[in-house]
Image (cartoon, rainbow, N blue to C red):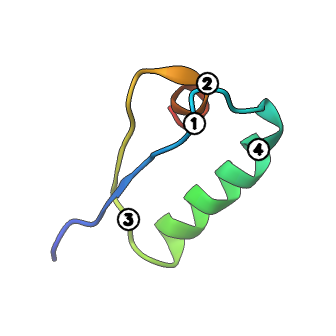
Amino acid sequence: MRQKSCFFIGHRETSEEIYPVLCAVVEEHIVRYGVTEFIVGRYGCFDGLAA
């Protein structure tokens, strides 16, 4: 089976209020789309929330 990846791309100035929605979307991508790899940068608030 082919591995599916998801890349997080967001703004460096992101409110922590998006965290619950971000978690729900990640779970959906795992369950519904079979994503097995998540790739995130290391700069800015969004990257920190995604990690």
Q: Which residue is mark 3?
A: 35
Q: Gap between marks 3 and 1, in whole Å? A: 22 Å
Q: Mark 3 or mark 2, which is nearer the start of the sequence?
A: 3
> Residue placed at 52% from the left, 72% from the top?
31
Q: Locate the N terminus and report the quarter of the image it occupies.
A: bottom left
- Check disc 2: other Cα within 10 Å, few if <14, some if 14-19, many if 20+: some
Q: What's under tag 1, amino acid-wise?
A: His
Q: Which residue is mark 1?
A: 11
Q: Which residue is mark 2?
A: 45
Q: What's under tag 3, amino acid-wise?
A: Val
Cβ–Cβ under 8 Å for marks 4 and 1: no
Q: Mark 1 or mark 4, which is nearer the start of the sequence?
A: 1
Quadrant of the image occupied by residue 33:
bottom left
| Left or right for 38, reference 13 | left
Determine the residue located farthest toward the right in the rendered image.
17
Q: Gap between marks 3 and 4, in whole Å? A: 21 Å
Q: Secondary structure at mark 2?
A: helix
Q: Which residue is mark 4?
A: 18
Q: Mark 1 or mark 3, which is nearer the start of the sequence?
A: 1
Residue 36 at x, y percent in the picture: 34, 58
Above or below for 48 versus 2: above
- Check disc 3: other Cα within 10 Å, few if <14, some if 14-19, many if 20+: some
Q: Gap between marks 2 and 3, in whole Å? A: 23 Å
